[in-house]
Amino acid sequence: MINVGKLLQIKGNEVWNTHPDDSVFEAMKMMQEKGIGALPVLLEGQLIGMLSERDCARKMILDELPARETKVKVLMTRQVYYTFPEQDVEICLAIMSKHHIRHLPVVENEKVLGLIAMGDVVKDIILEQQEKIDHLEHYISWEESY
């Protein structure tokens, strides 16, 4: 099993983020342009929240808030679960499942290094399982030839 740091190397670690005083409209526009589902909310470089498409869709619609006037700080999730580069990806999957979240910021020395999504983690786990299956199939076919 690979760790989060290796996963970031594979998928890339560009970090798009938003500021608590940005409008929700600006944040949603960035998510659409970048093809991502969540943004870390940073204040003076510090992670203070997360804003997901789900946060925006549910809260904007249910509370009838105007996207251009509503600030990110109104909708952001303040209790942020995060991980670190040395963490095993299977543990990240367990954290995401337990807390019903799809994105984990990767933090080291209070700096956001990247963001991993549940899809990234599941993709890695499936790839590793396929490698094990291939290895076992090779072993079985080798054993049968003797």
Image (spheres, grey):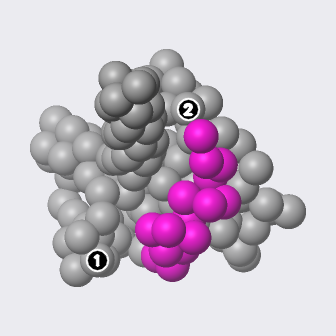
Query: Residue flagged by tag 2: what amino acid is it?
Result: Glu
Q: Which residues are magenta?
A: 1-18
* Res 30 → quadrant: bottom left
Residue at 48% across, 54% down: 116
Residue that mark 2 sits on: 90
38 relative to 112, above or below: above
Tell me the crowding category of disc 2: few under 14, some 14 to 19, or many 20 or more residues within 10 angstroms, Cα based. Answer: some
Query: Residue flagged by tag 1: what amino acid is it?
Result: Lys
Ranked by sequence position, the earlier of labels 1 and 2 is 1
Camera-nearest residue between 66 and 123: 123
Q: Secondary structure at mark 2?
A: helix
Q: Secondary structure at mark 1?
A: helix
Instruction: List x then y, in percent, for residue 22.
Output: 43, 74
Left or right side of 77 for 100: left
Residue 96 in sight in this render: no
Residue that mark 1 sits on: 34
Residue at 62% across, 61% down: 6
* Res 133 → quadrant: top left
